[in-house]
Image (cartoon, grey):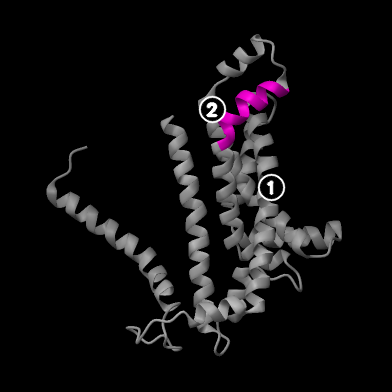
Amino acid sequence: MNLSRTARALLRIALALGLGVIYVPLAVVLLNSFNSDRTFGWPPSGLTFQWWRSAWNSTGVRDALWTSIQAGLGATAIALLLGTMAAFAVQRYRFFGRDTVSLLIVLPIALPGIVTGIALSNTFHTVLGVPLGLLTVIVGHATFCVVTVYNNVLARLRRMGRGLEEASADLGADTFTTFRLVTFPMLRSALLAGGLLAFALSFDEIIVTTFTSGAGVRTLPIWIFENLFRPNQAPVVNVVAAALIVFSVVPIYLAQRLSGEAQTH
């Protein structure tokens, strides 16, 4: 498709504006985390690490960070197990309702978070009688984290084919040996990429967490929301928000690199 010079220039301007709307506010948050002015006057009157030290010494922030890490690791572990099993079932076997199963697995990530949160909260309270806590947060996060692992593994299985696995079987290897020496090494980068994306999704989640956390369970996003408008907490909130930006970018970047490297091999 050939575009005129004017059209290309307009597309570049539109791209720059779109990226600016997304990333300029994030840059402001990062810069304000070092702003020496407690009221965040603009431009900054000076730069300081004081707020970062305050955030690190805050017991509430450290506890919320540890809770987020626990929830992220738990949800990622469940997502890796269920997402991988579901991908193998859908890709390798033919059964009635296979397309419906695939749709039901992907659906949670498309549903509004508040709908998922209400549904899970009602299920835990009314149907199962399970008290809300860290376990229910992990289960709630896993409902949408499964999708990232499922999509990554399913795409890799479709590209792999079954030639190498069949050759391994022809040479006398049993199913477990073939999986350990042939299938798993080819899936490893897809599993790692899916796991990183799942952890990033869980770490940033706030809506589903609000409905499934219960009293006494506070993740980092929940801590930010609760302290956003409290007096004298704005600098620390900016530091925590800046840290969340970094924590989100790193796993997504690594997952993209892993997926890209796998496609070039």
Q: Secondary structure at mark 2?
A: helix
Circles 2, 1 touching at the beta carbon (< 8 Å): no
User: What's the amino acid at mark 2?
Assistant: Arg
In the picture, residue 174 is in which quadrant?
top right
Q: Position of residue 189 (x, y in %)?
A: 54, 37
Q: Secondary structure at mark 1?
A: helix
Task: Identify the residue shown where x is 51% and y is 77%.
Answer: 52
Asked whether 131 or 170 is in front, the reply is: 170
Task: Identify the residue shown where x is 57% and y is 17%.
Answer: 164
Task: Identify the residue shown where x is 44% and y is 29%.
Answer: 265
Q: Which residues are magenta?
A: 176-188
Asked whether 118 or 152 is in front, the reply is: 152
Residue under label 1, please give it: 77
User: What's the amino acid at mark 1?
Assistant: Ala
- Mark 2 or mark 1, earlier in chain: 1
In the picture, residue 232 is in which quadrant?
bottom right
